[in-house]
Image: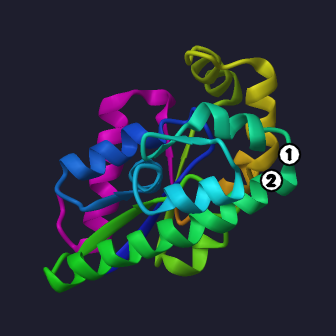
């Protein structure tokens, strides 16, 4: 089974691309979705112990947790030290299930793939990209997003140019859904031998 890492900076269209891979029948592990599950499961007591008062009714309160870690690199590293191993174990179990089921290709959707050393966990990497002005407009249109938050997020991410340099495949989402979908089909075909 080929493991394809899917990544891209905030606002580039990575979530849409992940959905398109899934719609094409490729199993996709979504790291963000895994974090949401963990924040209502096994991560709760660990996060509460590290950041007291950030959980309620058996779930992590992301807004309260954000106040602890946003802008505090030490606190953020502490949180990542809790969450990243749990997400990795979840992804490993996902891959084992699909490998056993005979899947030819599986996608690991990892927002911080290069930043967290995830390159060694995948066979190939596809980077989702878009021009900086489009990215900025998409991100600032999100509810609750500010210029300050956007800059803080970008500061934690490897630059788009560097991601593209390290990629095996690049999909520019500025050309619309149909072009993005066609690019995904072409990648699936190249990796599995199934031409669309």
Where disc 1 sits, the SS reads: loop
The image shows residue 1, relative to residue 20, as above or below, that is below
Q: Residue at x 44, y 75 (%)?
A: 89
Question: Which region is colored magenta?
Answer: 170-196
3D distance between C-alphas at marks 1 and 2: 5 Å
* Residue 130 visible in rendering: no
- Check the picture and name the quadrant holding the N terminus: bottom left
Name the image quarter holding residue 57.
Answer: top left
Total label count? 2
The image shows residue 126, relative to residue 172, as above or below, that is below
Where disc 2 sits, the SS reads: helix
Which numbered disc covers residue 75?
2
96 or 57, nearer to the observer: 57
Say whether residue 173 is magenta: yes
Looking at the image, residue 65 sits to the left or right of residue 23; the answer is: right
Find out whether the residues at labels 1 and 2 contact each other: C-beta distance under 8 Å. Answer: yes
Name the image colouring: rainbow
The image shows residue 48, relative to residue 179, as above or below, that is below
> Main structural element of the magenta stretch: helix, strand or loop?
helix
> In the rendering, at what x and y percent does residue 141 appear?
58, 14
Name the image quarter holding residue 45.
Answer: bottom right
> In the rendering, at what x and y percent does residue 118 appear?
59, 71
- Which residue carries the number 1 mark? 72
Mark 1: give few (<14), some (14-19) or many (20+) Cα within 10 Å.
few
Q: Residue at x 66, y 72 (%)?
A: 117
> In the displayed image of the protein, which residue is found farthest to the left?
101
Q: Residue at x 63, y 27 (%)?
A: 135
- Check the picture and name the quadrant holding the C terminus: bottom left
């Amino acid at each position: 089974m080929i493991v394809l890492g899917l990544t891209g900076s905030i606002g580039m269209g990575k979530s849409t691309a992940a959905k398109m891979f899934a719609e094409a029948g490729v199993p996709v592990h979504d790291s963000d979705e895994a974090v949401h599950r963990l924040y209502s499961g096994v991560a709760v007591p660990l996060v509460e112990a590290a950041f007291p008062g950030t959980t309620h009714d058996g779930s992590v309160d992301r807004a309260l947790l954000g106040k602890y870690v946003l802008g505090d690199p030490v606190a953020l590293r502490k949180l990542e030290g809790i969450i990243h191993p749990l997400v990795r174990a979840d992804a490993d179990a996902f891959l084992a299930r699909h490998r056993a089921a005979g899947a030819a290709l599986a996608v690991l959707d990892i927002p911080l793939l290069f930043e967290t050393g995830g390159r060694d966990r995948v066979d190939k990497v596809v980077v989702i990209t878009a021009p900086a002005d489009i990215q900025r407009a998409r991100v600032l249109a999100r509810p609750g997003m500010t210029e300050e938050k956007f800059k803080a997020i970008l500061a934690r991410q490897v630059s788009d140019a560097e991601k593209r340099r390290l990629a095996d495949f690049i999909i520019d989402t500025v050309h619309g859904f149909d072009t993005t979908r066609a690019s995904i089909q072409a990648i699936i075909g190249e990796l599995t031998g199934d031409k669309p």
